[in-house]
Amino acid sequence: MSLPVRRVTGSFPGAPTLLCRILRTTWVGAPETKGRLWTRLGDFNESHARRVWSCACCAEQEGEQRGEQRGEQRGRLQEARSLINRLLKKRFGELPLTISSQIENLTIENLESLGEDFLDFDSLEDLSNWLEKRSVS
């Protein structure tokens, strides 16, 4: 169900700014959404329409950048977990499930610290104590 659109005449200086804010916070960038926006911009004067369209394109780029950054962060986290698990397995053998699940819940910062600190561990008990300290903080 679509809402009826009423053509507005006159100048509303705040309208493009408001639309830009909305686009920057909600834009999904799907091609059909972009097409509908372009069609609806005919209800604005040309300078307002260009400004809103520019905001839509900027919002789309910002969304893509945020998505790329999230993907990079996830990849970095997965790689750090994988490396730590391989190093610990090589040092101590197969890890108990409780330790493995604690490692899965570590932040990237804690994984990096563990990558350095595990060199001082003599046993799985040292690793377990280290993990316990991190889960409390």
Image (cartoon, rainbow, N blue to C red):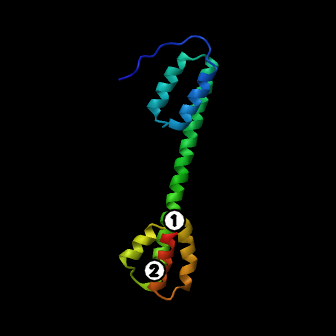
Label 1 sits on what residue type?
Answer: Thr
Q: Residue at x 62, y 23 (%)?
A: 14
* Tag in front: 2 or 1: 2
Can you give x and y, in whole percent of width and height, for residue 46 in the image? Answer: 62, 18
Question: Which of the two labelled residues, at mark 2 and mark 1, occupies the earlier sequence position?
Answer: 1
- Which quadrant is home to the N terminus? top left
Q: CA distance from mark 2 to mark 1?
A: 16 Å
Q: Residue at x 45, y 71 (%)?
A: 103
Can you give x and y, in whole percent of width and height, for residue 127 in the image? Answer: 48, 81
CB under 8 Å between callouts 2 and 1? no
Foreground pick, 22 / 87: 22
Judged from the image, the secondary structure of the residue bearing numbered disc 1 is loop
Foreground pick, 76 / 21: 21
The residue carrying mark 1 is 107
Q: Quadrant of residue 44?
A: top right
Q: Residue furthest bottom?
A: 122
Can you give x and y, in whole percent of width and height, for residue 105 in the image? Answer: 45, 66
Q: Classify residue 17 as left or right of residue 84.
A: right
Q: Residue at x 51, y 65 (%)?
A: 107
Judged from the image, the secondary structure of the residue bearing numbered disc 2 is helix
Q: Residues within 10 Å of mark 2 (few under 14, many from 20)?
A: some
Q: Residue furthest front?
A: 136
Can you give x and y, in whole percent of width and height, for residue 92 in the image? Answer: 44, 85
The residue carrying mark 2 is 128
In this rendering, the answer to whether 1 lies above or below 59 is above
In this rendering, the answer to whether 51 lies above or below 100 is above
Label 2 sits on what residue type?
Answer: Ser
Q: Classify residue 39 as left or right of residue 3.
A: right
Q: How many marks?
A: 2
Q: Residues within 10 Å of mark 1 (few under 14, many from 20)?
A: some
Q: Residue at x 54, y 75 (%)?
A: 114
